[in-house]
Image (cartoon, rainbow, N blue to C red):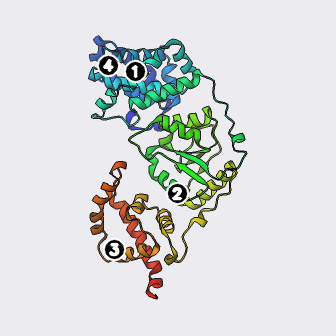
Amino acid sequence: MILCYDTNELNNDSIRMFINHYLITAIRKARSIDECNDLECDISELWIVTMKLCTDDYFMNCIILNDKHINFLHLITRDFFVYTDDSTINYLPYRFIVLALANILWSISFHELYCKNLLKNFPDLFGRLELIRLDDTIDKVVLDDYIPRHMYSFKRVADGIYHNLRTFQSTKSSISISKSLSTKKSIHSLIISYAHDDIDFCQQLHDVLVKLPQLSVSVNFNNGKYLWEEIAQTIKQSHLVLFLVSQHFYHSLSCRQEFTYATNTLNKLFIPIIIDADYQAKGWLETRVKHIRFVEGNFSNNCDELFSMMSEYLSVDLPSISSLKNSTNIKQWDSADVQRWFINNGIKSELYEFYQFVNGNELFLYAKAILEFPWTKEYERIKLRFEEKFNEHDQHLSSYEFLKFINALEQLRNRYFILFKTN
């Protein structure tokens, strides 16, 4: 049940009872080879359930500060050392256990008190993490198996734990962003931090922001390759960080890493943008009160509110989104106007790159020609070519996305038909 729901959907009292009356005891029993057969699930399943619960700070504290008075922090870390020993690391059934334990340690490492405990009692943790991180055997082996949603690759986890331990081991940065922004800049850099499940919204916002000449926008759309060092460097060089806050963001350890690094370690300027209509910030996000909430169907007004806040933070004059809209005469459109039309209609940006219309006349003539035939024929004609072109980015063209493009073309044709007919 726990693996099927987000932690916010679980009843706190019921899960706390489950932790204290079953989970702790079951893990202790499963750690004993003689008693493993008495349980209905093996130790790896129990650690995966624990990993999922530890993505929520409340449940993680219930586990570590359990009613059984068991030093669970030490138990988890000792098991991590046991299962990553030279004599056991290559035993295939242990691979998921190692990955689950590492993910648990990453969740724990966001808390200073627990981090200091680890640094004091397990000084060899840095070395063990580094040894396994350099050997990608674990990640290669588990690629062929089902990976639970909240489980990250070992390299990503090791980078996260390593960074958090180093952060609490050394003095925090005392960078003063307000002073660094006292002199005006012509170009301001920003980075968008988001959960991959929210990539569609991120793409939509990104496509608007890149039209502002005052901004240089960075975002990682390559979900298959996450390099923490590169992300950290980009955050460090940015003047502002936009966080796309949602349930997915809250449960993502990668997003939490980026958030704490930008706000706590670097003291960067940041704006949380709540993109879930009903989401209420909690836990480690709860104290971040100044934010913008994007309401469905009101994207333009929400963007104007965001631009206003960004203008205040960066001391720069940003235009309203209405000024980014197209000219009413399609014959005067250049390639930038065509791209803006794609953005305003929420059409997949890769379709613009695929067609590369150079002006409004080309776009209109294509709309007129393609709408003479069933849209499915054009979809079948270009789908393979589209996916070959964007194969590196693992981009696919769904019939839904293409139909959205066709509907926008139909509106365009109907709107400008008289203009072309009279000429």
CA distance for labels 1 and 2? 47 Å
Residue at the disc numbered 2? 296
Which corner quadrant of the image does residue 173 belong to? top right
Q: Helix, strand or loop at disc 3?
A: helix
CA distance for labels 4 and 1? 11 Å
Badge 1 amino acid: Leu
Mark before the other along the chain sequence, 4 or 1 = 4
- For disc 4, the neighbor class at 10 Å (few under 14, some 14 to 19, many from 20) is some
Mark before the other along the chain sequence, 2 or 4 = 4
State the residue in front, 37 or 406: 406
Quick one: quadrant of the N terminus? Answer: top left
On the image, the x and y values in percent for residue 7 come to 46, 35
At a point 41% along the width and 45% down the height, the residue shown is 222
Residue at the disc numbered 4? 89
CA distance for labels 2 and 4? 48 Å
Badge 2 amino acid: Glu
Badge 3 amino acid: Ile
Residue 298 shows in the view: no
Residue at the disc numbered 3? 370
Badge 4 amino acid: Ile
